[in-house]
Image (cartoon, rainbow, N blue to C red):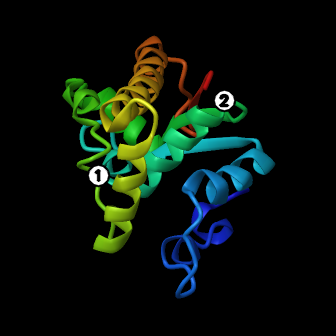
Amino acid sequence: VWICFFCNNQRRWLRPAPGSKPPSGVDVFGKTLTKVGRMLCVVDDFSDPRYFKRIWTVYEVFLALLLEVIELKITLLPSACEKFRQHRPDRKCLATINVMKARATEPADQLAIQAELKAAQGGSDDVTRKVQGFLSSGLEALVAKIWAGIYDGDAHANVEMAA
């Protein structure tokens, strides 16, 4: 199991030694993601997911999509699936994903990641569309499974998405 904050030293990437040029996130995170070969996005809540608000998680989805060699999956926690079944919230959260509005605890982290996203091919709007497309498609597929009753209440409802 790869847990990003154990495997990637975010501080070393964003705060290199004095006088040295910082490597790109693709170089740092991309190598680790490629080595691991898969990524699971764990979404805590359908109606107001924290996953979409954290710039690190959104950035990692972007890198996985960019690299195109990562097996990328999305899952809802069982509690979120159960909450969804009981309340059937609307899907407005799917349209709220915007990589430039996602936040980091450290303002310097946020600015560094935003700068890299702006510099990406197609710019931050294209990055937002790609990340939003993956997460929206994944959540839509999970919703279909929940509505169809293909969720046993004990396991995550996983949907594999092609990157």
Disc 1 crowd rating (10 Å Cα; few below 14, some 14-19, many 20+) is some
Mark 2: amino acid: Glu
Q: Could you say where residue 40 lies in the image, as x and y percent from the top left? A: 60, 43
Above or below — where is 37 with respect to 108? above
**Mark 2 or 1: the one toward you:** 2
Residue at the image point whose x is 23% and y is 49% from the top: 101
Q: Within the image, what quadrant is residue 103 found in?
A: bottom left
134 relative position to 71: left or right: left
Above or below — where is 102 with respect to 72? below
Q: Kindly tell me whether residue 124 is visible in this rendering.
A: yes
Q: Within the image, what quadrant is residue 160 found in?
A: top right
Residue at the image point whose x is 24% and y is 33% from the top: 93
Residue on which the image places disc 1: 102
Residue at the image point whose x is 32% and y is 31% from the top: 84
Residue at the image point whose x is 44% and y is 57% from the top: 56
140 relative position to 86: left or right: right
68 relative position to 115: left or right: right
Q: Dot 1: what SS?
A: loop
151 relative position to 111: left or right: right
Q: Dot 2: what SS?
A: loop
Q: Quadrant of the N terminus?
A: bottom right
Q: Within the image, what quadrant is residue 90 found in?
A: top left
Mark 1: amino acid: Ala
The residue nearer to you, when weighing 51 against 97, is 97
State the residue lying farthest toward the right.
35
Residue on which the image places disc 2: 68
Above or below — where is 83 with respect to 68? below
C-alpha distance separating marks 2 and 1:
23 Å
